[in-house]
Image (spheres, grey):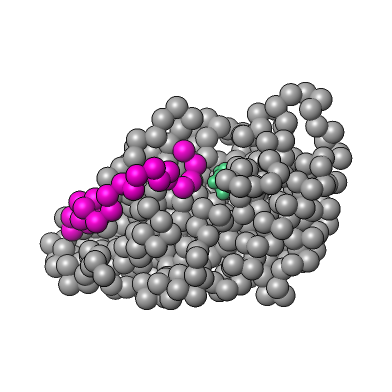
Amino acid sequence: MATHFEIDNSFISEQNQKTDDWVEEDYEHLSKKLRRQNVDIEDLVTRAEAFRVAIPSWGVGTGGTRFARFPGQGEPRDIYEKLEDCGTIFKLVRSTPAVSLHIPWDKPDDVGDLREFARQRGLHFDAMNSNTFQDQPGQKYSYKFGSLTHPDKSVRDQAIQHNIECIEIGKALGSKAHTVWIGDGGNFPGQQHFRRTLERYLESMRQIYAALPDDWRVFIEHKFYEPAFYSTVINDWGTSYYCARELGPKAFCLVDLGHHAPNVNIEMIVARLIQFGKLAGFHFNDSKYGDDDLDSGSVKPFQLFLIFNELVDAELNQEPHFDPAYMLDQSHNVTDPIESLMMSGVELVRAYVQAQLVDRQQLSDAQEKCDPLRALATLKQAFTTDVAPILAVARARAGGAIDPISTFRESGYRQRKAEERPARKGAAASGIV
Ligand code: RM4
Ligand code: MN
Ligand code: MN
């Protein structure tokens, strides 16, 4: 069998030695600064080390737009190569041991073999994702006009069966959750009867819900437009919340950051879902207009921080049913996907650690005393603290890279994969193109 290039641990520690000096110096300085605020830096490093975010299998391939896709060199050609890349990301940043699969893009021939392949790389499987927004070769009924909410029962049944199959595959892989995002909706006023389509959704979802094992959860993902441009069936968090309540205690609402109109107060939606005990978790990304595919923290890092502020507040308060699943869901069209995913993963830990720095007593006092300026200043103090040394130390202690991007580039991984993975004739990249 051909050997596959891997970055080895000794290479990572060699690279880390190049940067050790400044890390130590900056860490020391930050620890003194934080001590003045009664914060123990070691406690933050422990929390940073424990932070986990899942990688979407479809994120390691190059994405594209409706206009074009510019494939990168050495792209993964199948689920095994995708897992190889996920394993590399995990090795360098140490916070991403879970991978989320999309079926049928990642449908394995041999589930046991795939599970073992992942295990050998220290990886396991996060939520499963179904796909009823595309037609697959040989599929009997088309999803052109919807899936779980289609007027024709045969189409709905086919979509239900597909979701149940995803759960079955997930069970064999050791997953514990299933995410349902549908592309169902309308492009024209009058095309769909709004109430009737939502009724059909619930009817279909009840059957999927019934197939969930006891220790599983189902995540409902809302999106306000695209691919349908006039209306979508699960358009916002209110609809998602209503459905999750109707379905039962194993149903939760998933927030994909890009699935909201520009300027929507997402942190407030997060707080509401926490309060109602229905927050499933996140698909993290960033957006500028109506997109859902920019890298996390690239455009609105303050918003990301404010979201984590709500999450950390809930964590510290030990809110009931609070067990959010974190995943990245973004499309890398012009960057190396491995680099983007590593950087995004790091941005999430950064926001998480910054949110830990919020002086909660001071914030609460400012709120009770109706002092908005003080409240904002309290948040800003945490947000403007440069926690980079904490992140670097956490990664290094866990065996990861102090500088994941440089280490990745120095390793020559991408060039090696370009040799190992010549484009297969006629093979289309699986995923959104
Ligand atoms: C959608 C949504 C889903 C993802 C697909 C690929 O916009 O975010 O989570 O499965 O894209
Ligand atoms: Mn998503
Ligand atoms: Mn999306």
Q: Nearer the viewer, residue 244 or 202?
A: 202
Image quadrant occupied by the N terminus: bottom left
For residue 157, above or below residue 114: above
Q: Would residue 54 appear left or right of 194 to someone viewing this image?
A: left
Residue occupying image coordinates x 76% and y 63%: 209
Q: Verify whether residue 429 appears in magenta.
A: yes
**How would you classify the magenta stretch by its main secondary structure?**
loop
Q: Position of residue 429 (x, y in %)?
A: 42, 45
Residue at the top extreme?
189
Residue occupying image coordinates x 43% and y 36%: 64
For residue 307, above or below residue 143: below
Q: Verify whether residue 163 appears in magenta.
A: no
Q: Nearer the viewer, residue 258 or 388?
A: 258
The total number of labels drawn is 0
Q: Nearer the viewer, residue 385 or 415?
A: 415
Q: Read off the magenta span.
A: 411-433
Quarter of the image for residue 4 reads bottom left
Residue occupying image coordinates x 59% and y 68%: 170
Q: Quadrant of ligand 3?
A: top right
Q: Would residue 254 appear left or right of 116 to someone viewing this image?
A: right
Q: Would residue 197 appear left or right of 30 to someone viewing this image?
A: right
Residue occupying image coordinates x 78% and y 41%: 150
Q: Nearer the viewer, residue 403 or 221?
A: 221
Q: Position of residue 316 (x, y in %)?
A: 58, 68
For residue 252, above or below residue 265: below
Q: Position of residue 253 (x, y in %)?
A: 68, 54
Q: Position of residue 356 (x, y in %)?
A: 47, 62
Quarter of the image for residue 252 reads bottom right
Whether residue 116 is visible, yes or no, is: yes
Whether residue 43 is visible, yes or no, is: no
